[in-house]
């Protein structure tokens, strides 16, 4: 990876483009990318489960790299060593005996057990124990242990709703924000998602998870940030949701306990901001205005289908 | 059953007739997947609904149920007729009579199916009213299109059947195989439409 | 097939337009498919350009096509472009070249038949396909523009509420006709292989090409109808106001938008194998032909193909891990998906074993076959990350997925098509292609191609989600811009390298050296015929005595190959120049 960590010099990309024979017009410079240091790995891991993905990815990479290198080596070696020589014949070897068949199936099963096996095992463990091991909020109606958030995705923004002081959703003291997702550091966060129009997918790259937000049903997702995760991050929409899909980002802030208490205390003002933000957003995308009806929120589903 | 050549005593299938049978079976298997897809969709949508039919849908009128039962009987009878038509070699006017009877069943079926829709339209149940209504019209309508197609295909076989039955000039052996292949393929299609109706009937009226 | 031979048609129209001849229909499919490849490819170049060089019009074409937006690809057109790029490449490039084209060309020739079982159906199959092309091409010009919800067309984005124009409806019509065409083709291929194999040719005497094409036809016959069924519901939703895919919320009387995803992927996963199986078959044969060595473990390879065909029907749920499908179901799909690596491993093992200790001729078709093994290795292995839930939750809908399926479906199938074209060109057109140009074409393709798609794996791993014309909205994506520029540079080079192919193709078509009957020294049946074969292929249907891969057979002294048609008791019976 280190090898790749230099910026492609502008003249090189320009030269390559020339070479393609497509770049015929004169006077065009390639707009050089904003000079930010390049990155070839996922963004910072901020959740307590994120390392599970990272380590599993690395493990699989090493395993398949082994297979791939072996395969490529055989290919290249054969291309060189077994090139046709005049007058010579290849081995007349059909490999159609029972023994050959058993051997190749056994080898394939060995690869399955050796490579897919661990992958399946770890994936099963991580999913059951972590990624889909949702915290139980049945008896909880305050958000001390598990912060509950309702998410409404829409073309091309994210709405968030917190229960507020009364611990109940869809009441007057709810805190509602637009594209502004804040959570207290270290606390478990449980989200219930839906969409008001098309399918979106809430992607938290820093937490290594995503879940679709489907209109007409409620899905859920959970994560817990590490204790040192305070900072500003981003939410992405991973599912194609229209021509402005690529703009559908929201800010994702992990707050210290103190910042959180301060922010959560100002609930009324925050919800007012939401209305203003929505109006502003509508202004930018005129076609959304007609189809949107902005009253939303639901009673927390103690047992959503999944 | 179906003959290779008209004149052969023992019935051996001409290669082309076997090809056509295999091809037709493949086509029906393939087309059956479309029906299965629609039934699968029905199942998915139906089992997601808390109540079925949904509370705001009035129960189907008795008339409609009677029509559906009648249609089921018609379809079964038509298949029996058809089996009879091709039960022996296609060289007598008998087959034309039975094919005619099959077509009559099909026509009455279509008529009753249209009656069914009219019966439902009158009190105002439309395709766009909701998922239940959409599925009802989709499945019955999709099947009815097949009945209509089957009737047209029968008309297409009639000249051949006439020729085979010896009405008019006698066809060449090659031509005769051609006619028989056509008639047999269409009859396979009709049996398929029959089975498809039984499935549609069971799905739409009993689940 | 009866022993009599029908007379060759004489008029231009019955000979070249509404032809019943499988060889002519094959050429029709291939030419249309190559046009599809060109259009889809240019679209890909414009898409890549937009990502890498925001605000820069695409050279020449930009100003011509998008004069209203200063030569730039606007966001809505960007969506149309990637939607149509996917649709065109899958249904209008790969399908016609490998299945419609080489399926038609090779099946009768390689099994020793005079034509398909149903020649008229074959012709109809092409013309249904042509109608489909018209609908798809027309969809660019209807008000509102082409379909723009991705080639997967998930509702509600694919509903009239969000795509009001006729573009998506036309897209659906195109799908119907392509479905009709493929079903007709599939019925024909299956029946032909069952019924018209030359006497003596058992199932396990068929070339692996035929195995691949036959299994593809089976999958096509069974699973394309699922897409057709799903598309019927979608078009009713669009034109008749029904409620199959509408969401049960927000005042809509509800169906279920996820239903489409089920139907689409029940079709969609087998479709992956529909596209790759012919290429596998072709490459399995070519590796043996050019190593001058029998295909290692022929029966096991064929059985692995069958196993994969069956498995492919059971794994579609791995496309839906993030939808909220029940964990039980998800885990079952995960396990079934992983099982596919067993037959896949068998392929690789047998491929490598085939070339090992061979006498390898590095002709262009062989290079492309080896290239397929290489890129498909990358693609197949990268699939492991997506089949397992824990890694898919992060990688789903990122460029990792794009890189993965391009390496498998696109790159591998592209190389399979090139291998097939370079290999059968002499038989098809009676002229040789230029081998040197072909080799340059290969090396100038394989390097950038690997760079493009491995680059995509890397940016996907770094978090770049799909279908984004610009990365600038996200802070965490900005560091990926440079990598994306590299990918684009590689992609443009890849595109430019294809000019060599186009030159080689047309130059050879008109001025290539005349091809002998059997330029490669290969023993499958098409090589006993003149190049190009006569109208009805075989004057006398040959008897089959040997399997398709008799290379280096010690009982034959003077050459290292044996024709399938050669009688071991009566050597020299009908050699390559029998006619
Ligand atoms: Cu979105
Ligand atoms: Cu799949």
Image: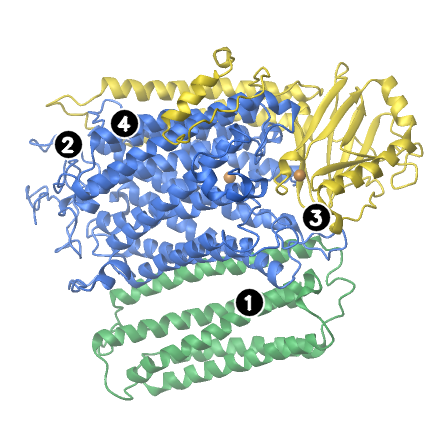
Q: Which of the 4 image quadrants contains residue C464?
A: top right
Above or below, C88 against B4 in this view is above
Q: Is residue A103 visible?
A: no
Q: Could you say where residue C510 lies in the image, as x and y percent from the top left?
A: 19, 44
Q: Which residue is mark 4?
A: C440
Q: Is residue C544 left or right of residue C271?
A: left
Mark 1 vs ligand 2: CB under 8 Å? Answer: no
**Which residue is nearer to you in this view: C543 or C63?**
C63
Q: Which residue is mark 2?
A: C553
Q: Dot 1 surroundings within 10 Å: few (below 14), some, or many (20 or more)?
A: some
Above or below, C322 against B39 in this view is above
Kind of element beneath mark 1: helix
Disc 1 + disc 2, Cβ < 8 Å: no
Q: Dot 3 surroundings within 10 Å: few (below 14), some, or many (20 or more)?
A: few
Question: Pointer 4 indicates a residue of which chain?
Answer: C
Between the residue at mark 4 and the residue at mark 1, the CA separation in whole angstroms equals 54 Å
Between the residue at mark 2 and the residue at mark 4, the CA separation in whole angstroms equals 33 Å
Q: Dot 4 surroundings within 10 Å: few (below 14), some, or many (20 or more)?
A: some
Q: Could you say where residue B181 lies in the image, as x and y percent from the top left?
A: 32, 71
Q: Is residue A76 left or right of residue C454?
A: left
Q: Is residue C450 visible?
A: yes
Image hue for chain C: blue
Question: Pointer 1 indicates a residue of which chain?
Answer: B
Disc 3 + disc 4, Cβ < 8 Å: no
Q: Quadrant of ligand 1?
A: top right
Kind of element beneath mark 3: helix
Image hue for chain B: green
Q: Which residue is mark 1?
A: B142
Q: Is residue C231 left or right of residue C499?
A: right
Q: Could you say where residue C105 lies in the image, as x and y percent from the top left?
A: 26, 49
């Amino acid at each position: 990876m280190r090898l790749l960590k230099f910026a492609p010099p502008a003249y090189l990309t320009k030269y390559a483009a020339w070479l393609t024979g497509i770049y015929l017009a004169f006077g065009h410079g390639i707009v050089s990318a904003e000079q930010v240091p390049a990155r070839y790995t996922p963004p910072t891991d901020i959740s307590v489960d994120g390392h599970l993905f990272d380590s599993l990815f690395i493990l699989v990479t090493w395993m398949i790299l082994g297979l791939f290198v072996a395969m490529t080596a055989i290919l290249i070696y054969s291309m060189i060593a077994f090139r046709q020589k005049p007058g010579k014949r290849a081995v007349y070897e059909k490999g159609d005996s029972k023994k050959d068949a058993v051997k190749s199936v056994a080898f394939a099963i060995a690869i399955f057990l050796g490579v897919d096996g661990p992958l399946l095992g770890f994936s099963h463990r991580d999913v059951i124990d972590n990624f889909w091991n949702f915290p139980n909020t049945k008896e909880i109606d305050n958000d001390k242990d598990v912060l509950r958030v309702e998410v409404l995705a829409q073309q091309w923004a994210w709405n968030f709703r917190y229960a507020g002081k009364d611990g109940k959703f869809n009441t007057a003291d709810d805190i509602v924000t637009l594209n502004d997702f804040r959570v207290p550091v270290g606390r478990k966060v449980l989200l219930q998602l839906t969409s008001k129009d098309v399918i979106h997918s809430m992607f938290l790259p820093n937490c290594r998870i995503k879940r679709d937000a489907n209109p007409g049903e409620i899905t859920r997702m959970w994560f817990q940030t590490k204790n040192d995760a305070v900072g500003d991050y981003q939410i992405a929409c991973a599912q194609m949701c229209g021509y402005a899909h690529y703009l559908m980002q929201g800010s994702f802030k992990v707050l210290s306990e103190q910042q959180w208490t301060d922010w959560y205390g100002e609930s009324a003002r925050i919800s007012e901001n939401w209305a203003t933000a929505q109006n502003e957003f509508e202004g930018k995308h005129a076609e959304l205005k007609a189809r949107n009806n902005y009253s939303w929120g639901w009673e927390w589903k103690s047992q959503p289908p999944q | 059953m179906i003959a290779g050549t008209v004149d052969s005593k023992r019935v051996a299938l001409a290669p082309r007739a076997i090809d056509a049978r295999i091809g037709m079976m493949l086509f029906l298997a393939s087309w059956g997947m479309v029906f299965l897809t629609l039934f699968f969709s029905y199942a998915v949508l139906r089992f997601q609904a808390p109540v079925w039919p949904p509370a705001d849908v009035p129960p189907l009128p008795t008339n409609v149920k009677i029509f559906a039962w009648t249609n089921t009987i018609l379809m079964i009878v038509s298949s029996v007729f058809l089996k009879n038509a091709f039960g022996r070699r296609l060289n007598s006017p008998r087959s034309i009579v039975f094919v005619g009877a099959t077509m009559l069943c099909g026509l009455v079926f279509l008529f009753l199916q249209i009656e069914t829709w009219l019966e439902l339209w009158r009190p105002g149940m439309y395709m766009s009213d909701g998922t239940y209504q959409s599925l009802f019209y989709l499945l019955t309508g999709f099947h009815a299109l097949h009945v209509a197609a089957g009737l047209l295909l029968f008309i297409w076989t009639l000249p051949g059947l006439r020729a085979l039955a010896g009405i008019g000039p006698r066809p060449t052996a090659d031509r005769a195989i051609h006619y028989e292949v056509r008639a047999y393929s269409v009859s396979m299609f009709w049996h398929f439409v029959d089975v498809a109706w039984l499935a549609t009937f069971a799905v739409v009226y009993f689940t | 097939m009866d022993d009599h031979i029908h007379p060759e048609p004489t008029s231009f129209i019955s000979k070249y337009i509404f032809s019943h001849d499988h060889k002519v229909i094959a050429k029709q499919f291939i030419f249309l498919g190559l046009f599809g490849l060109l259009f889809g490819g240019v679209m890909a170049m414009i898409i890549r350009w937009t990502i890498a060089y925001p605000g820069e019009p695409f050279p020449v074409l930009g100003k011509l096509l998008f004069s209203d937006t200063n030569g730039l690809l606007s966001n809505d057109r960007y969506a149309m472009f990637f939607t149509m790029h996917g649709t065109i490449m899958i249904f209008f490039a790969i399908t016609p070249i490998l299945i419609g084209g080489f399926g038609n060309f090779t099946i009768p020739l390689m099994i020793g038949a005079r034509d398909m079982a149903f020649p008229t159906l074959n012709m109809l199959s092409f013309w249904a396909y042509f109608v489909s092309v018209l609908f798809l091409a027309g969809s660019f010009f209807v008000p509102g523009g082409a379909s723009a919800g991705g080639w997967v067309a998930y509702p509600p984005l694919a509903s009239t509420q969000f795509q009001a124009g006729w573009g998506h409806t036309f897209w659906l019509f195109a799908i119907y006709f392509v479905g009709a065409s493929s079903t007709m083709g599939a019925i024909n291929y299956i029946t032909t292989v069952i019924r018209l194999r030359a006497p003596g040719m058992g199932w396990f005497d068929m070339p692996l090409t035929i195995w691949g094409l036959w299994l593809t036809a089976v999958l096509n016959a069974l699973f394309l109808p699922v897409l057709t069924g799903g598309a019927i519901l979608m078009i009713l939703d669009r034109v008749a106001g029904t409620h199959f895919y509408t969401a049960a919320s927000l005042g809509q009387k509800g169906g279920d938008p996820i239903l489409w995803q089920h139907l689409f992927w029940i079709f969609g996963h087998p479709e992956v194998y529909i596209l790759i199986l012919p290429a596998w078959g072709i490459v399995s044969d070519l590796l043996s032909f050019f190593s001058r060595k029998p295909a290692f473990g022929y029966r096991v390879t064929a059985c692995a193909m069958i196993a994969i065909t069956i498995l492919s029907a059971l794994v579609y749920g791995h496309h839906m891990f993030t939808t909220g499908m029940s964990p039980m179901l998800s885990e079952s799909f995960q396990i079934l998906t992983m099982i596919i690596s067993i037959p896949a491993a068998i392929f690789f093992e047998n491929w490598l074993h085939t070339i090992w200790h061979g006498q390898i001729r590095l002709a262009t078709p062989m290079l492309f076959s080896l290239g397929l093994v290489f890129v498909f290795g990358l693609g197949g292995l990268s699939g492991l990350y997506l089949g397992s839930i824990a890694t898919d939750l992060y990688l789903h809908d990122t460029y990792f997925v794009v890189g993965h399926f391009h390496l498998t479906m696109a790159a591998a199938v592209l190389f399979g098509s090139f291998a097939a074209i370079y290999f059968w060109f002499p038989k098809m057109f009676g002229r040789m292609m230029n081998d040197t140009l072909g080799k340059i074409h290969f090396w100038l393709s394989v390097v950038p191609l690997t760079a493009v798609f491995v680059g995509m794996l890397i940016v996907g791993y770094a978090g770049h989600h799909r279908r984004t014309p610009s990365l600038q909205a996200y802070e965490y994506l900005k560091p990926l811009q440079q990598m994306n520029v590299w990918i684009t540079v590689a992609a443009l080079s890849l595109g430019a390298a294809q000019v060599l192919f186009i030159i080689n193709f047309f130059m050879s078509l008109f001025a290539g050296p005349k091809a002998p009957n059997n330029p490669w020294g290969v023993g499958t049946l098409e090589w006993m015929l003149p190049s190009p074969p006569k109208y009805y292929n075989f004057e006398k249907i040959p008897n089959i005595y040997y399997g398709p891969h008799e290379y280096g057979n010690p009982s034959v002294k003077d050459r290292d190959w044996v024709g399938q048609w050669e009688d071991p008791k009566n050597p020299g019976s009908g050699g390559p120049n029998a006619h």
